[in-house]
Amino acid sequence: MVTKQEQERRVRDYRARQAVHERRQRRQRRDSLIGAALALVVLAGGTALIATRPAPADPADTAAPTPSATAPAAESTVPDPSLAEGRTWTGSLTVNGVELDVELDGAAAPQAVSAVLADAQRDYYDGKTCHRLTTSEGFSVLQCGSVDGQGGGDPTYMYGPVENAPADDLYVEGTIAMARQSGNADSNGHQFFIVYGDTSIPSDSAGGYSVIGRVTGGLDELQEAVIAKGTAGGVPDGAPAEPVTIEDFVLQ
């Protein structure tokens, strides 16, 4: 006999699969339209550049992952922490053709995971860029998800508190954590960063940075396809040498 809990689990899993299927169909239609638009741009001889903020010249001046203060209007309401269901969410994050296997901990960081989950479900991240790469020894992060592709945060979409930050300030390789403003524990937003090498980020007056999960596969491929190419101009903290785009983010 199938229990009520098992029935509910099956219904939830079915809805999750349906949502993924519908998202993929929408993405395919969107990609077709984008392909046609790009073809027109090529015919017209158009080119595009990604603007970036100036990067520190000295590795010692490398700042913690922080969104800038200026941004467009809010896109949505911050979801309730209950959306994360206090469980582990698995899925994939595809960046420049590299599919990263990811795992988010809804029990350890319910508010941040709920926010990222809601963004992924509404395709917020599709087409967004990873605007910042750091290459200093002991500080290895790729920061993604800004609303404007240049690190801009959305001051009307902010939440806290800091959740699941490491007590020793060490963010081990594979960690996925949220960027926030310096000294403000309630300034998490859409931006997250992937730690591709053990990184120490000192806590500030607000604490550390919310760790939402980890990359469980594909990090070596990301190193080869993105990290190894370095930053524009070879600076230790700046835009990637080649534009880095999030193609898909699926969680279930």
Image (tube, helix red, strand yellow):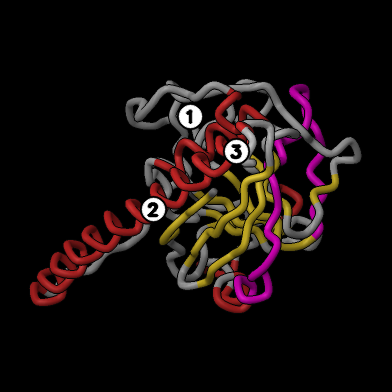
Residue for badge 1: 69
| Residue for badge 3 | 66
Q: Residue at image x 59%, y 24%? A: 82
The residue that appears at 63% across and 56% down in the rendered structure is 102
Name, please, the residue furthest toward the front: 1
Return the disc, 2 or 3, that comes first in the chain's sequence.
3
Q: What element carries label 3?
A: loop
Rendering coords of residue 157 (x, y %)? 46, 25
Q: Which mark is residue 126?
A: 2
Which span of residues is magenta-colored? Answer: 198-223
Q: Dot 1: what SS? A: loop
SS at circle 2:
loop
When the figure is inspected, residue 77 is found, relative to residue 246, above or below; the finding is: above
Q: Is 211 placed left or right of 233 in the picture?
A: right
Q: Say whether marks 2 and 1 touch (CB < 8 Å).
A: no
The N terminus: image quadrant: top right
Residue 207 is tagged as: none
**How far apart are the alpha carbons under marks 2 and 1?**
22 Å
Q: In this view, does 85 lie above or below 227?
A: above
Question: Is 189 a magenta residue?
Answer: no
